[in-house]
Image: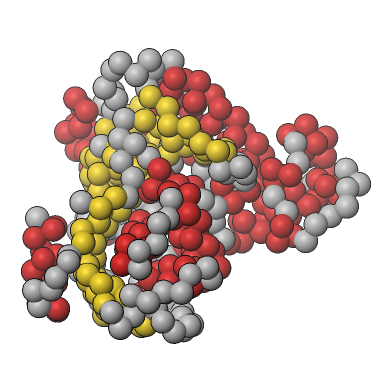
Amino acid sequence: MIMESLFQAYRTFFGRGDALYRLFSPYRICPLGAHVDHQHGLVTGFAFDKGIEFLFSATDTGKVEMCSLSFEGLTTFNVQRPVEEKQNNWGDYLRGATWALQQDFSLKSGVKGVVQGSMPIGGVSSSAALLCGFVMALAKVNHLELDKMQVIHYASEAEREYVGLRNGILDQACVVLCESDKLLYMDTLTSEYKLLPFGDGSQALPFEIGVFFSGVTRKLTGTDYNLRVSECKTAAWIVEAYENRALKELEHTRLRDVTEDEFLRHESVMPERFARRARHFFTECDRVQAGVEAWTRGDIRAFGQLIFESCESSIHNYECGSPELIALYEIMRETDGIYGGRFSGAGFKGACIALVDPEKRESIERHVREEYLKRFPQYRETMEIFFCHPSNGSDFL
């Protein structure tokens, strides 16, 4: 259905066209490893079978003309010229991807086409899906042979340095690297990763992914996301100062630079705000390692319980979460058939995600919807619930 609407839109904007390329770039969830990738922590992730579809062709002039069926406005610029400043719309992600590639390549061919997302915005990393997909689109029409880690690098650089969100590589790694029947486990300090089958690999995954949209959306660049990143860096700086180390610039400091034992030595004398951020980082990395152990022995209930614990730390130590998301989390905790769940993405606005028993899908949807709308009836028209399956990463169709 989505692809047919893209073909119709392409014909409306650009005519028939030749050499049309199709690309699917999935959304992602992070079951364990919340808010630690920007501190070079340990993370896990799944891509899933909702995302952004691209239909496009090359332009010889270098001109980019992209329209979105999810957002208003036609994005136009030329890849043969320096990218202009941000315009604070969805096209900034396309300009950012172009800017990142221009640092290393002379781009000649542009792109004209249409994109469409299959979910509301908020919590499933639609920005990473769009960035990774457009990096791959530009590479295709310019005949650049990029490996997966290069796609991740350029998409991440675009979001940090051009768009202005100071995140790590978790989102882009999930969008590009994931496989449908495995858990991505990555050390974001070294970029080393593993794709781990569930249990001994002989059984199908015993869950589906539930995505519960609160009905509230908000761009991360308008939240406290970047402030939390700075607080984590400051926490690391404080520990290093107490350890009498030579300090680096704050920009280059991460909580991964200090050990958990070093943090514990000074936790009681640190300002509580910064101690809580460090506490979340170290306990979350511990949960990732415990979760990987549960996953590889085939214990979905233990894995899910750790996801619940991750959200508790997000609320109390990382101090994110709107009233709506906290309500969804509390409802998920007492819903039969949900193994584990937490805020998705940054956890300020958007969605909660959960691993759910497929046989209880209908009762889960009914219970979560009813209980949530009792508390927030104003979102009756905008709350949405999806059930999805893990998928492979971005690829041409």
Q: Is residue 155 above or below residue 194?
A: below
Mark yes or no: residue 191 visible.
yes
Question: Residue at image x 14%, y 78%?
Answer: 14
Give the x, y percent position of residue 240: 83, 47
Q: Quadrant of the N terminus?
A: bottom left
Q: Quadrant of residue 205?
A: top left
Question: Residue at image x 23%, y 33%?
Answer: 364
Q: Quadrant of residue 127?
A: bottom left
**Nearer to us in this view, 204 or 307:** 204
Mark yes or no: residue 367 visible.
no
Looking at the image, residue 201 sits to the left or right of residue 74; the answer is right
Give the x, y percent position of residue 41: 60, 41
Question: Residue at image x 30%, y 41%?
Answer: 392
Q: Quadrant of residue 386?
A: top left
Question: Residue at image x 67%, y 39%?
Answer: 279
**Nearer to us in this view, 260 or 130:** 130
